[in-house]
Image (cartoon, rainbow, N blue to C red):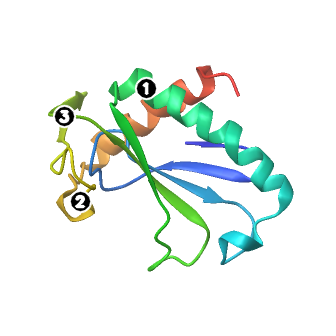
């Protein structure tokens, strides 16, 4: 969907909330403390760009960053925009099933291929239009 020198931003194939992403370090590191100073320096602007992009797309109330690294050991964050109720895009409606508590990844909506492509296309366009 989007990338910088040190980070890639992808749409989560399962959506616990609309616009959920994965922010992945492009370096071959398995521990957050092993991320290079250059990648750490770039992380702040990438997060600001993600938040600006998602604010316009989902009108989120809060945003959660989860660094779980259990199934995939590469350094990455799950980015979960949070809101009361539900949000829709192009026929895909996603409630925030756990609002106002911690996100529940197991209750995610799984978009079909067309919906996932449409979501990725819409977010890619917003990423391109959001200043870095």
Q: Nearer the viewer, residue 73 or 121?
A: 73
In what element is the residue under mark 2?
loop
Question: Separation of disc 3 and disc 1 at Cα?
Answer: 14 Å
Mark 3, residues whose alpha carbon is within 10 Å: few (<14), some, or many (≥20)?
Answer: some
Q: Which residue is mark 2?
A: 104
Whether residue 5 is visible, yes or no, is: no
Question: Which quadrant is the N terminus positioned in?
Answer: top right
In what element is the residue under mark 1?
helix
Q: Nearer the viewer, residue 63 or 9?
A: 63
Q: Answer left or right for 80 relative to 124.
A: left
Whether residue 53 is visible, yes or no, is: yes
58 relative to 66, above or below: above
Q: Which residue is mark 3?
A: 84
Q: Check if mark 3's residue and mark 1's residue have beta carbons within 8 Å.
A: no
Question: Which quadrant is the C terminus positioned in?
Answer: top right
Question: Separation of disc 3 and disc 2 at Cα?
Answer: 14 Å
Q: Position of residue 16 (x, y in %)?
A: 26, 51
Q: Check if mark 1's residue and mark 2's residue have beta carbons within 8 Å.
A: no
**Residue at position x 60%, y 32% from top?**
49
Q: Position of residue 17 (x, y in %)?
A: 28, 44
Q: Which residue is mark 1?
A: 55
Mark 2, residues whose alpha carbon is within 10 Å: few (<14), some, or many (≥20)?
Answer: few
């Amino acid at each position: 969907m989007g990338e910088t020198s040190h980070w890639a931003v992808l749409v989560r194939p399962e959506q616990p909330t609309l616009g959920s992403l994965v922010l992945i370090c492009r370096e071959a590191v398995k521990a957050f403390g092993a991320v290079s100073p250059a990648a750490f320096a770039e992380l702040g602007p990438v997060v600001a760009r993600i938040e600006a992009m998602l604010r316009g797309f989902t009108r989120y109330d809060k945003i959660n960053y989860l660094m779980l690294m259990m199934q995939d050991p590469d350094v990455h964050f799950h980015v979960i925009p949070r809101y009361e109720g539900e949000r829709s895009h192009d026929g895909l409606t996603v409630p925030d099933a756990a609002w106002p508590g911690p996100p529940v990844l197991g209750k995610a909506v799984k978009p079909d291929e067309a919906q996932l492509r449409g979501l990725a296309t819409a977010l890619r366009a917003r990423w391109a239009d959001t200043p870095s």
